[in-house]
Image (cartoon, rainbow, N blue to C red):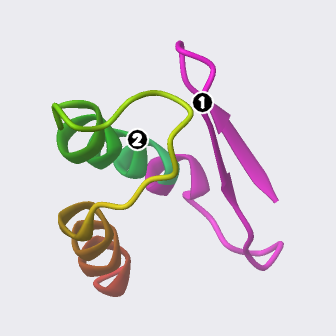
Amino acid sequence: MTCFQTPTGSKFLLFTEPAHSNTDVILRKCYELYADYVMKNPFYSLEMPIRCEKFERAVQGWVAVR
């Protein structure tokens, strides 16, 4: 398990095999996508569940090529 905590206090968790490398790169990219698709959404407010198809598709697409 790898945890990435953002400056705003949000946490991203990634569960992988122990031998998996570059987990920090994956988490930073997820945070970048989160900032682009979720935080810039005018209808999203903190503490709300994330329900953004564009964000989900972007994460799935990025992880699929890894």
Instruction: Residue at 77%, 75% (x, y): give it.
Output: 19
- Helix, strand or loop at label 2? It is helix
Q: Do the residues labelled 1 and 2 touch (CB within 8 Å)?
A: yes
27 left or right of 61 in image? right
Instruction: Residue at 62%, 64% (x, y): give it.
Output: 21
Identified by mark 1, the residue type is Ser
Pick whichever of labels 1 and 2 is earlier in the sequence: 1
Q: Where is residue 64 in the image (x, y as percent from the top left)?
A: 34, 86
- Front-lying residue, 3 or 54: 54
Residue ID for mark 1: 10
In the image, residue 22 above or below residue 25:
below
40 left or right of 8 in image? left
List the single residue furthest toward the bottom: 64
Q: How crowded is mark 1: few (under 14 residues within 10 Å), some or many (20 or more)?
A: few
Q: Which numbered marker is on residue 31?
A: 2
Identified by mark 2, the residue type is Tyr
Q: What stretch is highlighted in magenta?
A: 1-26
Q: How crowded is mark 2: few (under 14 residues within 10 Å), some or many (20 or more)?
A: many
- Helix, strand or loop at label 1? It is loop
Membership of 17 in magenta stretch: yes
45 left or right of 53 in image? right
User: Which quadrant, please, contains the N terminus?
Assistant: bottom right
Q: Position of residue 17 (x, y in %)?
A: 78, 79
